[in-house]
Image: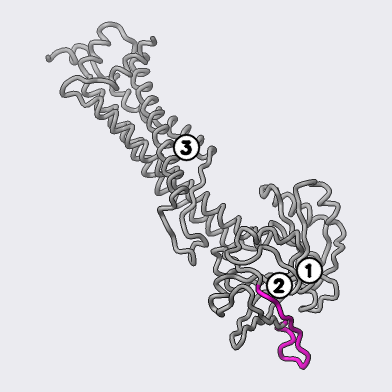
Amino acid sequence: MNFPFYLSTRYLRSTQKGSFTRIAGILSVAGLAVGIAALLITLFILNGFERVISQKISDFDGHIRIRHFLSNPIQRDIAGLDRVQANYPNLISRSSFIQGQALLRKGKQAEGVVVEGLEPNGMEFISSMIVDGKQTIHPNESIIGQRLADQLGISVGDRIVLFDIETLHGTKKRLGQFTVSGLYHSGMTEYDHSLVFIDLEGANRLFAMDGAISGEVLRLNDANQYRTISQELSNALAYPYMVINWKEKNRALFKWMDVQRWPILFIFGLIALVGVVNIISALAMVIIDKTRQIGLLKSLGITQGDLKKVFLIKGLIIGLSGALGGALLAILLAALQNTFKWIKVPEDVYFMDFIPVDVSGGDIGVIFLFSVATSILAAWWPTVRTNKIEPSSALKYE
């Protein structure tokens, strides 16, 4: 066995009475593990929040929308769209939509809403949010948010009337009667209170579109490709078409998420830094505690390089143990939170009713390597003290 490695492990396992070596090593590992766990859990929570919010927004808006620059009706045949879609087979699903403002009325109750008419292949995302009724929309049927239904006292099977707001002040009002076939709940208050889904043909009649549409929704099997495809569509489609992805549409929200990520990581990174400082303190205590043994080793001919290796290896062992322990602790806590949902949050504020925790192998790898490298660097500084230990002085007293 390599002598510096053997000696460093002996120091970590030291059971000598009155020795601080073993206790200092254990406390260093524990401190680093807690710091690494706190940092990783923070990253996992941030990842979870971003994933859930991105998923909910992209469910409603799709990953990319194509519409008129001035929100005017457009024809279904968009030159250039088919060509771009052909470049990404099995990646893009496309559906037309009609969107307009309307007044929803049920008896004496009325509320302004946004009506979105969808094709059958564009309704799949609704199925995961249905809390009552059917998951599909047939002609003269509608699906509304549960919050809106509770506010207006609407139940599945009730009939509602939708008025095109643009015609309310005219002599000839456009309206349609629809049966509520389902209620959805997404957790996003803005959508649950105001968005009503009907079939595309019903929206065409309600808003007198004459076969035109408001735009096209593109949903991607790989959301990471949205920037590339958005850019390619922008280059392929001329004015008056406008291409916007779901992150551009909600730029303020995602900008806020990016901005708040760094202060949070900095604060919890300081906790991990405390664990690294503990390594410096622990190794300094070991050197003080083992001064006589270091002097004896020097008198027996151990080189200064091998002596430094002893403490560097000890720092490496502490770093590996602390990083591994912290990673395992973070993964365990993440699994427990995702399974039992112990930590709840107000849904009206955060768009979700519990804190989601997404474990990321990339985050674990980066933090693991960084903590180990930092532990080795932290172990280097105390070894400088061993240069000043003279065998004659160290062995002078019993």
How many residues crowd mark 3 within 10 Å: few (<14), some (14–19), many (20+)?
Answer: some
First in sequence, mark 3 or 1: give its number.
1
Q: CA distance from mark 1 to mark 2?
A: 27 Å
- Residue 117, relative to residue 87: is it above or below? below
Residue drawn at 78 percent across, 52 percent down = 232
Colouring style: one colour
Q: Position of residue 80 (x, y in %)?
A: 86, 56
Look at mark 1 in the image and give the residue it sits on.
68
Q: CA distance from mark 3 to mark 2?
A: 52 Å
The answer to whether one can see residue 168 in this image is yes
Q: Tell me where the magenta segment starts and ends, as one range.
A: 164-180
Quarter occupied by residue 126: bottom right
Q: Position of residue 245 (x, y in %)?
A: 69, 58
Q: Position of residue 255 (x, y in %)?
A: 56, 58
Seen as rendered, the residue at the extreme front is 157
Residue type, label 2: Glu
Look at mark 2 in the image and give the residue it sits on.
141
Disc 3 to disc 1: CB gap under 8 Å: no
Q: Nearer the viewer, residue 367 or 343?
A: 343
Residue type, label 1: His
Residue drawn at 55 percent across, 53 percent down = 50
Q: SS at mark 3?
A: helix
First in sequence, mark 3 or 2: give its number.
2
Look at mark 3 in the image and give the residue it sits on.
367
First in sequence, mark 1 or 2: give its number.
1
Residue type, label 3: Ile
